[in-house]
Image (tube, rainbow, N blue to C red):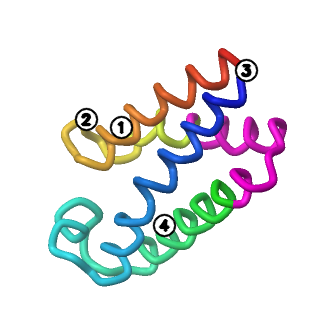
Amino acid sequence: MQLLITVSLLVNIIVLVPVCAGLARNASWAQATYGPPSAGRSILLSVYMAIGLVSAILLFVPDPGFAAALLLVQVVYKVTTPLTVGTFRNPAVISNLLIAALHTVTLAMT
C-alpha cells in the first residue's frame, strides 16, 4: 500500500531533520542522547542524512522495491540498537523501536 510507504518515509524525514540538525549543531540533547562529538557520531550523522535524503527522493520518485529495502535495513538496525547501546532507556533506542514497529507494519502490509 503506497500510503503506508509514504507515511514511513515522511516519518523518517520528520524525525531525521531535527536529529541531524541537533547532531550537527552539537545540541545539549544530542550530547545527552548520542554522547559527545566523535568520529562515530559524525558517521551516524552521515548515515542519518543518507536515510533522510533517500526517503525524500523516494517521495518524489516512488519505487516500492527501493523503499522496502530502505525500510528493511532500518528495521534491522533499529531493532538491534538496544543490544548495541545496552539499554532500552536511551531516547534514541526508544524512538528507534517505535519507528521500527511502524516500518515493520508498512513492510508487512505492502
Instruction: Tell me the magenta residue range.
Output: 57-75
Question: For the residue labelled by badge 2, is the local secondary structure a helix, a strand or a loop?
Answer: loop
109 or 90, nearer to the observer: 109
Q: Which residue is mark 3?
A: 110
Viewer-side label of 3, 4: 3
Q: In the picture shown, does residue 57 fall above or below 71? A: below
Q: In the picture shown, does residue 81 fall above or below 23? A: above
Locate residue 38, reporting x and y percent.
37, 80
Q: Quadrant of the N terminus?
A: top right
Q: Which residue is mark 2?
A: 88
Callout 2, which amino acid?
A: Phe
Q: Tell me if 18 is positioned left or right of 101 in this view.
A: left
Callout 3, which amino acid?
A: Thr
> Are the residues tagged 1 and 4 within 8 Å (C-beta)?
no
Locate residue 46, reporting x and y percent.
55, 72
| Residue drawn at (40%, 53%) of the image | 15
As measured in the structure, the alpha-carbon distance from the residue carrying label 3 to the one carrying label 4 is 28 Å
Residue 65 drawn in magenta: yes
Disc assigned to residue 44: 4
Query: Which callout, 3 or 2, points at the residue further toward the start of the chain?
Result: 2
> Are the residues tagged 3 and 2 within 8 Å (C-beta)?
no
Q: Which residue is mark 1?
A: 82
Viewer-side label of 3, 2: 3
Query: Which callout, 3 or 1, points at the residue further toward the start of the chain?
Result: 1
| Residue drawn at (57%, 24%) of the image | 104
As measured in the structure, the alpha-carbon distance from the residue carrying label 1 to the one carrying label 4 is 16 Å
Viewer-side label of 1, 4: 4
Query: Which callout, 1 or 4, points at the residue further toward the start of the chain?
Result: 4
